[in-house]
Image (cartoon, rainbow, N blue to C red):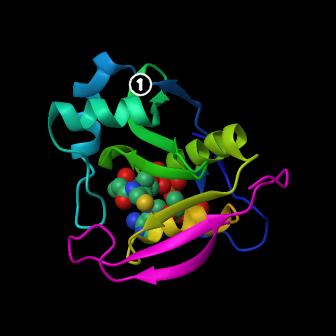
Amino acid sequence: MSWVCEGGGKCYTPLKIISMKLKKVQLDDWELLRTLEEASATKMYAPCEGEEGYKKYIEESTVYFIMDKKNAVGTISYEIQKDGKCVINGLTVKPEHRSRGIARQAMEYLLNEIDDREIELVVHPENIPALLIYLHLGFIITKWEDNHFGDGEPRLHLKKKSRKGRS
Ligand SMILES: CC(C)(COP(=O)(O)OP(=O)(O)OC[C@H]1O[C@@H](n2cnc3c(N)ncnc32)[C@H](O)[C@@H]1OP(=O)(O)O)[C@@H](O)C(=O)NCCC(=O)NCCS
């Protein structure tokens, strides 16, 4: 097994070299999408509800399966809203595939696709792995909100400037 450490110097987390890619989720894939999303449901991440909820999510967002070889091991998505705002609205990795650098690599792939825009997202303040990914990739925290989704849980708002100057 090969491992790399980024940045030189002290390295606390080895990243296994992985070969993953993103595969666009189609409407018919909603059940697999639900299985993956529900595997990650916690107070920090609330998936959609029901067939209609998942189909609406697939129609309104660009949703990808994160593929490790032929297996879907996670999900990642963004939505271009009516006002042109780009919001990353999903990121999950199945529990048994976590801490291998999969989510971070998937985010890097996604940012290559959308980094001509300013990007926003929200994350639970206790969600350390997610926060580490976003902060390392250049997002900054802009706001704390006590009850963003109405579930009584707080969220941090994060923003990343467009690489090409567009907002
Ligand atoms: C957040 C999530 C997608 C991360 O997936 P992952 O593939 O395990 O993430 P990575 O392996 O790329 O690790 C991301 C960072 O967290 C760190 N990390 C991994 N596991 C960790 C743990 N248990 N505790 C603390 N940090 C951890 C890694 O070192 C890495 O940091 P680095 O970029 O500084 O090296 C995954 O935990 C998940 O699906 N959570 C539930 C859904 C969720 O909360 N999504 C985020 C919504 S905003």
| Horizontal and vertical percent position of residue 51 | 17, 31
- The picture quadrant where one finds residue 94 is top left
- Please tell me whether residue 151 belongs to the stretch shown in magenta: yes
Q: From the viewer's perspective, is 137 left or right of 51?
A: right
Q: State the residue position of label 1.
A: 25
Horizontal relation, residue 79 to residue 152: left or right: right
Q: Quadrant of the N terminus?
A: top right
Could you say where residue 59 lies in the image, as x and y percent from the top left?
A: 39, 29
Residue at image coords 23%, 70%? 150
| Along the line of sight, the residue nearer the viewer: 86 or 1 | 86
Q: Which residue ends up furthest to the left in the rendered image? A: 50
Q: Is residue 24 above or below residue 74?
A: above
Viewer-side residue, 24 vs 55: 55
Determine whether 92 is above or below 6 in the image.
above
The quarter of the rendered structure image containing the C terminus is bottom right
Q: Position of residue 131 (x, y in %)?
A: 51, 69
The residue at the point 74 percent across, 62 percent down is 161
Which stretch is magenta?
139-167
Residue at the image position 41 percent from the left and 77 percent from the top:
125
- For residue 27, say whether it is visible: yes
Whether residue 45 is situated above or below residue 127 in the rendered picture: above
Q: How many marks?
A: 1
Let me know if residue 132 is in the magenta part. no
The residue sitting at 72% across, 41% down in the picture is 112
The reply to whether residue 99 is in sight is no
Q: Is mark 1 within 8 Å of ligand 1?
A: no
Q: Amino acid at mark 1?
A: Val
Residue 80 placement, left or right of 54: right
Q: Nearer the viewer, residue 162 or 101?
A: 162
Question: How many C-alpha atoms fall within 10 Å of the one at disc 1: few (<14), some, or many (≥20)?
Answer: many
